[in-house]
Image (tube, coloured by chain):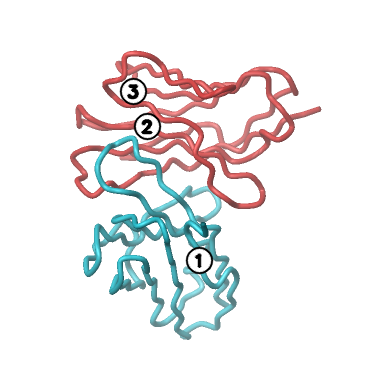
Chain colours: A cyan, B red
Amino acid sequence: NAGVTQTPKFRVLKTGQSMTLLCAQDMNHEYMYWYRQDPGMGLRLIHYSVGEGTTAKGEVPDGYNVSRLKKQNFLLGLESAAPSQTSVYFCATAPPGQLNEKLFFGSGTQLSVL
Amino acid sequence: AQKITQTQPGMFVQEKEAVTLDCTYDTSDPSYGLFWYKQPSSGEMIFLIYQGSYDQQNATEGRYSLNFQKARKSANLVISASQLGDSAMYFCAMIESGAGSYQLTFGKGTKLSVIP
Protein backbone atom coordinates (compact mmCIF):
# COMPACT_ATOMS: atom_id res chain seq x y z
CA ASN A 1 0.00 0.00 0.00
CA ALA A 2 1.32 3.41 -0.99
CA GLY A 3 -0.77 5.29 1.62
CA VAL A 4 -0.41 9.02 0.95
CA THR A 5 1.79 10.02 -1.97
CA GLN A 6 2.89 13.56 -2.72
CA THR A 7 4.41 14.68 -5.99
CA PRO A 8 6.78 16.27 -6.61
CA LYS A 9 9.13 15.85 -3.65
CA PHE A 10 11.21 18.91 -4.53
CA ARG A 11 10.59 21.93 -6.72
CA VAL A 12 12.23 25.25 -7.37
CA LEU A 13 10.13 28.03 -8.85
CA LYS A 14 10.79 31.58 -9.92
CA THR A 15 8.59 34.33 -8.53
CA GLY A 16 5.39 34.53 -10.55
CA GLN A 17 5.47 30.97 -11.85
CA SER A 18 2.62 28.59 -11.20
CA MET A 19 2.57 24.97 -10.16
CA THR A 20 0.36 22.23 -8.80
CA LEU A 21 1.16 19.81 -6.00
CA LEU A 22 -0.61 16.47 -6.14
CA CYS A 23 -1.66 14.41 -3.17
CA ALA A 24 -2.92 10.91 -3.90
CA GLN A 25 -4.25 8.45 -1.34
CA ASP A 26 -5.30 4.85 -1.60
CA MET A 27 -6.88 4.54 1.85
CA ASN A 28 -10.37 5.66 0.82
CA HIS A 29 -10.30 8.46 3.38
CA GLU A 30 -12.90 11.21 3.17
CA TYR A 31 -10.86 14.00 4.72
CA MET A 32 -7.79 15.47 3.09
CA TYR A 33 -5.63 18.39 4.15
CA TRP A 34 -2.80 20.59 2.96
CA TYR A 35 -0.41 21.96 5.59
CA ARG A 36 2.69 24.08 5.26
CA GLN A 37 5.61 23.84 7.65
CA ASP A 38 7.95 26.72 8.27
CA PRO A 39 10.81 26.86 10.79
CA GLY A 40 9.55 27.88 14.22
CA MET A 41 5.93 27.92 13.05
CA GLY A 42 4.85 24.31 13.25
CA LEU A 43 2.32 23.06 10.73
CA ARG A 44 -0.38 25.44 9.54
CA LEU A 45 -3.49 24.39 7.67
CA ILE A 46 -3.86 25.86 4.19
CA HIS A 47 -6.99 24.19 2.81
CA TYR A 48 -8.89 21.03 3.47
CA SER A 49 -11.61 18.84 2.01
CA VAL A 50 -14.24 16.73 3.72
CA GLY A 51 -15.18 14.81 0.60
CA GLU A 52 -15.10 14.66 -3.17
CA GLY A 53 -16.09 17.98 -4.70
CA THR A 54 -15.72 19.95 -1.45
CA THR A 55 -12.98 22.30 -0.30
CA ALA A 56 -12.63 24.82 2.51
CA LYS A 57 -10.13 27.38 3.74
CA GLY A 58 -7.82 26.76 6.63
CA GLU A 59 -5.65 29.12 8.63
CA VAL A 60 -3.39 30.39 5.81
CA PRO A 61 -5.26 30.05 2.47
CA ASP A 62 -4.11 33.20 0.69
CA GLY A 63 -2.18 32.59 -2.51
CA TYR A 64 -3.33 28.98 -2.83
CA ASN A 65 -6.20 27.17 -4.51
CA VAL A 66 -7.28 23.56 -4.22
CA SER A 67 -9.47 21.05 -5.96
CA ARG A 68 -10.86 17.63 -5.04
CA LEU A 69 -12.41 16.32 -8.25
CA LYS A 70 -11.76 12.71 -7.28
CA LYS A 71 -11.93 11.27 -3.79
CA GLN A 72 -8.40 9.96 -3.93
CA ASN A 73 -6.72 13.16 -5.14
CA PHE A 74 -6.30 16.58 -3.57
CA LEU A 75 -4.49 19.22 -5.60
CA LEU A 76 -2.82 22.35 -4.24
CA GLY A 77 -2.18 25.13 -6.73
CA LEU A 78 0.00 28.19 -6.60
CA GLU A 79 -1.10 30.57 -9.37
CA SER A 80 1.68 33.13 -8.94
CA ALA A 81 4.38 31.90 -6.60
CA ALA A 82 5.98 34.29 -4.11
CA PRO A 83 9.14 33.86 -2.01
CA SER A 84 6.91 33.78 1.10
CA GLN A 85 5.54 30.48 -0.19
CA THR A 86 8.92 28.81 0.21
CA SER A 87 8.06 26.02 2.62
CA VAL A 88 7.62 22.31 3.13
CA TYR A 89 4.13 21.22 2.16
CA PHE A 90 2.45 18.21 3.71
CA CYS A 91 -0.67 16.47 2.61
CA ALA A 92 -2.61 14.46 5.18
CA THR A 93 -5.70 12.29 5.20
CA ALA A 94 -8.11 10.94 7.79
CA PRO A 95 -11.27 8.87 7.89
CA PRO A 96 -14.35 10.69 9.15
CA GLY A 97 -15.85 10.09 12.55
CA GLN A 98 -14.03 9.85 15.83
CA LEU A 99 -11.82 12.50 17.41
CA ASN A 100 -9.09 9.92 17.97
CA GLU A 101 -8.55 9.25 14.28
CA LYS A 102 -4.95 10.14 13.57
CA LEU A 103 -3.85 11.91 10.43
CA PHE A 104 -1.87 9.99 7.83
CA PHE A 105 0.81 12.18 6.29
CA GLY A 106 2.60 12.19 2.99
CA SER A 107 6.35 12.56 2.91
CA GLY A 108 6.28 16.27 2.11
CA THR A 109 7.22 18.56 -0.77
CA GLN A 110 10.10 20.99 -0.40
CA LEU A 111 9.25 24.09 -2.44
CA SER A 112 11.65 26.97 -2.97
CA VAL A 113 10.51 30.18 -4.66
CA LEU A 114 13.35 32.39 -5.85
CA ALA B 1 -4.63 33.48 21.02
CA GLN B 2 -2.66 30.37 20.25
CA LYS B 3 -4.60 27.17 20.67
CA ILE B 4 -1.51 25.06 21.26
CA THR B 5 1.56 26.39 23.05
CA GLN B 6 4.87 24.59 23.24
CA THR B 7 7.18 26.77 25.27
CA GLN B 8 10.39 24.79 24.78
CA PRO B 9 11.93 25.45 21.36
CA GLY B 10 14.76 23.05 22.18
CA MET B 11 15.55 20.45 24.83
CA PHE B 12 18.52 18.27 25.65
CA VAL B 13 18.36 14.98 27.48
CA GLN B 14 20.96 12.40 28.41
CA GLU B 15 20.53 8.98 26.88
CA LYS B 16 18.51 6.63 29.12
CA GLU B 17 17.05 9.53 31.09
CA ALA B 18 13.39 10.55 31.03
CA VAL B 19 12.27 13.84 29.49
CA THR B 20 9.06 15.85 29.57
CA LEU B 21 7.97 18.00 26.65
CA ASP B 22 5.45 20.66 27.58
CA CYS B 23 2.19 21.43 25.82
CA THR B 24 -0.64 23.69 26.93
CA TYR B 25 -3.83 24.19 25.01
CA ASP B 26 -6.74 26.58 24.85
CA THR B 27 -10.29 25.52 24.07
CA SER B 28 -13.80 26.08 25.35
CA ASP B 29 -15.03 22.91 23.64
CA PRO B 30 -15.74 20.20 26.25
CA SER B 31 -14.95 17.47 23.71
CA TYR B 32 -11.49 17.51 22.21
CA GLY B 33 -8.49 15.34 21.53
CA LEU B 34 -4.78 15.86 21.93
CA PHE B 35 -2.07 14.29 19.80
CA TRP B 36 1.68 14.13 19.81
CA TYR B 37 3.63 13.65 16.59
CA LYS B 38 7.34 13.06 16.07
CA GLN B 39 9.25 14.41 13.09
CA PRO B 40 12.77 13.01 12.69
CA SER B 41 15.32 14.67 10.45
CA SER B 42 14.01 12.59 7.55
CA GLY B 43 10.90 14.77 7.64
CA GLU B 44 8.12 12.22 8.02
CA MET B 45 5.37 12.82 10.57
CA ILE B 46 4.97 9.92 13.00
CA PHE B 47 1.95 9.60 15.29
CA LEU B 48 2.95 8.86 18.89
CA ILE B 49 0.02 9.11 21.26
CA TYR B 50 -3.55 10.36 21.68
CA GLN B 51 -5.54 11.61 24.69
CA GLY B 52 -9.25 12.33 24.63
CA SER B 53 -10.74 15.00 26.86
CA TYR B 54 -13.06 12.48 28.51
CA ASP B 55 -10.42 9.82 29.02
CA GLN B 56 -10.07 9.07 32.72
CA GLN B 57 -6.56 7.72 32.54
CA ASN B 58 -3.42 9.16 31.03
CA ALA B 59 -2.57 7.63 27.68
CA THR B 60 0.50 5.42 27.36
CA GLU B 61 2.19 3.89 24.31
CA GLY B 62 5.37 2.00 25.10
CA ARG B 63 7.97 4.52 26.29
CA TYR B 64 5.59 7.42 25.65
CA SER B 65 3.04 8.64 28.14
CA LEU B 66 0.89 11.72 28.20
CA ASN B 67 0.60 13.64 31.45
CA PHE B 68 -2.91 15.05 31.02
CA GLN B 69 -3.92 17.75 33.49
CA LYS B 70 -7.33 18.90 32.31
CA ALA B 71 -7.82 21.73 34.81
CA ARG B 72 -4.46 23.20 33.86
CA LYS B 73 -5.09 22.52 30.15
CA SER B 74 -1.79 20.80 29.78
CA ALA B 75 -0.86 17.64 27.89
CA ASN B 76 2.81 17.02 28.42
CA LEU B 77 4.60 14.19 26.65
CA VAL B 78 6.88 12.07 28.79
CA ILE B 79 9.51 9.92 27.10
CA SER B 80 11.10 7.38 29.39
CA ALA B 81 14.57 5.91 28.89
CA SER B 82 15.53 8.23 26.04
CA GLN B 83 17.29 6.75 23.05
CA LEU B 84 19.45 8.40 20.42
CA GLY B 85 16.68 7.75 17.91
CA ASP B 86 14.36 9.98 19.92
CA SER B 87 16.25 13.03 18.65
CA ALA B 88 13.61 14.81 16.57
CA MET B 89 11.02 17.57 16.47
CA TYR B 90 7.93 16.89 18.55
CA PHE B 91 4.58 18.50 17.85
CA CYS B 92 1.56 18.71 20.09
CA ALA B 93 -1.78 19.06 18.28
CA MET B 94 -5.45 19.40 19.15
CA ILE B 95 -8.74 18.51 17.52
CA GLU B 96 -11.98 20.07 18.76
CA SER B 97 -15.32 18.39 18.15
CA GLY B 98 -16.89 21.79 17.46
CA ALA B 99 -14.56 22.28 14.53
CA GLY B 100 -16.79 19.88 12.62
CA SER B 101 -14.38 19.11 9.86
CA TYR B 102 -11.66 17.46 11.86
CA GLN B 103 -9.08 20.24 11.73
CA LEU B 104 -5.92 19.46 13.65
CA THR B 105 -4.16 22.52 15.10
CA PHE B 106 -0.44 22.13 15.75
CA GLY B 107 1.94 23.80 18.14
CA LYS B 108 5.26 25.20 16.98
CA GLY B 109 7.18 22.19 18.13
CA THR B 110 10.06 21.26 20.42
CA LYS B 111 13.38 20.03 19.10
CA LEU B 112 14.68 17.24 21.31
CA SER B 113 18.32 16.28 21.22
CA VAL B 114 19.44 13.12 23.00
CA ILE B 115 23.05 13.20 24.18
CA PRO B 116 25.02 9.96 24.36
- Marks 1/3: CA–CA distance: 35 Å
> How far across and down, in percent of the image, does residue A80 sit?
41, 82
Tell me where residue A33 sits by quadrant.
bottom left
Q: Is B45 rendered above or below residue A30?
A: above
SS for dot 3: loop
Residue marked by disc 1: A6
Which residue is found at the position 58% from the left and 68% from the top?
A: A9
Residue marked by disc 2: B34
Residue marked by disc 3: B73
Type of amino acid under label 1: Gln
Same chain for the residues at labels 2 and 1, yes or no? no
Tell me where residue B85 sits by quadrant.
top right
Tell me how many marks there are: 3
> Depth check: B101 or B74 in front?
B101
* Residue at mark 3: chain: B
> Depth check: B87 or B54 in front?
B54
> Depth check: A81 or B17 in front?
B17
Type of amino acid under label 3: Lys
Type of amino acid under label 2: Leu
* Residue at mark 2: chain: B
- Marks 3/2: CA–CA distance: 11 Å
Q: Residues within 10 Å of mark 3 (few under 14, many from 20)?
A: some
Mark 1 vs mark 3: in front: 1
* Residue at mark 1: chain: A
Which residue is found at the position 32% from the left and 14% from the top?
A: B56
Which residue is found at the position 62% from the left and 19% from the top?
A: B80
